Amino acid sequence: MREGEERGAVTGGVLKRVRETAVDLLFPRRCPVCGDVVRPFGEMICPGCVKELSVVRQPVCKRCGKEVESQRIEYCPDCVRRQRTFERNLALLNYNDTASRSMSAVKYKGRREYLDFYAEAVCLRFGKAIRRMEADALVPVPIHPSRRRSRGFNQAELLADRIGAGLGIPVYPDALRRDKKTLPQKQLNQEERLKNLQKAFVPGVLPEEVRTVLLVDDIYTTGSTMEACARALRSMGVEKIYGLTLCIGHNS
């Protein structure tokens, strides 16, 4: 690099940090757990709030990533009973009351900055495992256009964008479309959930050379959403489908 280019790069880096600091001062970052301004300055979460998040610990189900009771258990009861089209799912947090409040704040109160912390945590925890998957693309689980208009964004897409930037993997938000407006999944049992999602996800735009995909979503409960998306991707010629979710529920 030439001397002038080096000075320009240094100056650009300094200006970027100055802009980021100014934004933080004007719009201080709030903690994804307590919602207060994060202290100390520059952190993404209050140090005392981290312990309220329940990080998924080994041993876990080799398919969906839910915690299981013993290393001798390969698959959780849900995955024993039901066929899965996806290879495996990685989950960062157990879906407890704290995680539920945090995810609700993202989706319904516009706290998109919370995803900065969660994406960084995903990259630190699963970066090596994701690279071993050799994923060609990250595909966020889509939401219905009407919901996107009312919310203003798709939280799974924002999360995928941040993870993709951190790990250097391209993101294809239009790979799947959600054409069918479904009933809220939390009101339904496992069989009703899968039926509710039949034909909800349809193929979108994905380069032909993409053969391994990492599906990204915020919450995994029974796996019905991920299964429906995986089937749609398989119909497009995708050979291997992995999952990545911020939160995962308990076995039914």
Image: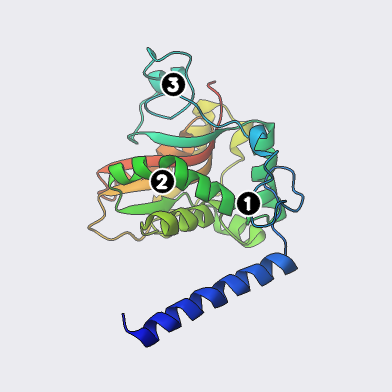
Q: Which amino acid, by three-letter code, is at mark 2?
A: Leu
Residue closest to the eye, 155 or 47: 47
Q: Residue at x 75, y 53 (%)?
A: 37
How many marks on residues?
3
- Residue mark closest to the camera, 3 vs 2: 3
The residue that mark 2 highlights is 215
- Relative to residue 109, is residue 209 drawn left or right? left
Q: CA distance from mark 3 to mark 2?
A: 22 Å
Q: Residue at x 45, y 40 (%)?
A: 125
Q: Which amino acid, by three-letter code, is at mark 3?
A: Pro
The residue that mark 3 highlights is 59
- Label 3 crowd (10 A; few <14 / some 14-19 / many >=20): some
- Relative to residue 7, is residue 105 drawn left or right? right
- Residue mark closest to the camera, 2 vs 1: 1
| Circles 3 and 2: CB atoms closer than 8 Å | no
Q: Secondary structure at mark 2?
A: strand
The label shown at residue 171 is none
- Label 2 crowd (10 A; few <14 / some 14-19 / many >=20): many
Residue closest to the eye, 126 or 207: 126
The residue that mark 1 highlights is 44
User: Mark 3 or 2 closer to N-term?
Assistant: 3
Q: Residue at x 41, y 37 (%)?
A: 227
